[in-house]
Image (cartoon, rainbow, N blue to C red):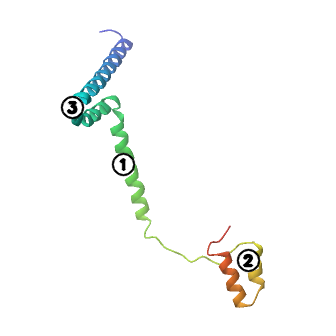
Amino acid sequence: MGSLRESVLLLFIIRKDEIEHAATRLLTQAQVNAEAAPKMFEEYVKLRYPYLETAKKREKSETIKMLLAEVNKGPFAIRPLGEPTAKSKLYKKVQRNTDPEVTSRLMRKIGKSVPV
């Protein structure tokens, strides 16, 4: 047994060789049998990036937590908007005008959105 540094270096070299072997095996298998290539690719990805599976599980659980938090807030509610608070010239004309026909025509021009 050598030092800790030597052991870590040997593990690194072995891991690198395993990944290189998997890549070569994947390329060879893809040329020989194209139908088995997707399965070999999945094996290669699992070997090359072992942390992806854990990251996917973590992301899935976080997404489920967020969705549950939204569901626990209750049903969506649609509330009517208050009076428009626009400070446009057109809105001021609507407020000054008392003729209902002109007011409705001007309100159609303003639209249903309320600028802030």
Q: What amino acid type should be assigned to the residue bearing mark 1? A: Lys
**What SS does tag 3 mark?**
loop
According to the picture, the residue beneath numbered tag 1 turns out to be 60
| Nearer the camera: disc 3 or disc 2 | 3
Q: Position of residue 38 (x, y in %)?
A: 27, 37
Which residue occupies the foreground of this view, 78 or 44? 44
Mark 3 vs mark 2: which is more N-terminal? 3
**Quadrant assignment, res 22:** top left
According to the picture, the residue beneath numbered tag 3 turns out to be 33
**What SS does tag 2 mark?**
helix
Name which residue lies at 78% across and 74% down: 89
**Quadrant assignment, res 92:** bottom right
Q: Is residue 56 above or below residue 20?
A: below
| Nearer the camera: disc 2 or disc 1 | 2
Q: What amino acid type should be assigned to the residue bearing mark 2? A: Tyr
Q: Position of residue 114 (x, y in %)?
A: 65, 71
Q: Position of residue 45 (x, y in %)?
A: 32, 33
Identify the image quadrant of the N terminus: top left
Q: Residues within 10 Å of mark 2 (few under 14, many from 20)?
A: some
Q: What amino acid type should be assigned to the residue bearing mark 3? A: Asn
Mark 2 vs mark 1: which is more N-terminal? 1
Residue 112 image label? none
Q: Is residue 92 above or below residue 28?
A: below
Q: Residues within 10 Å of mark 1 (few under 14, many from 20)?
A: few
Residue 91 image label? 2
Q: CA distance from mark 3 to mark 2?
A: 71 Å
Q: Residues within 10 Å of mark 3 (few under 14, many from 20)?
A: few
Q: CA distance from mark 2 to mark 1?
A: 48 Å
Number of dots carrying numbers: 3
Mark 3 vs mark 1: which is more N-terminal? 3
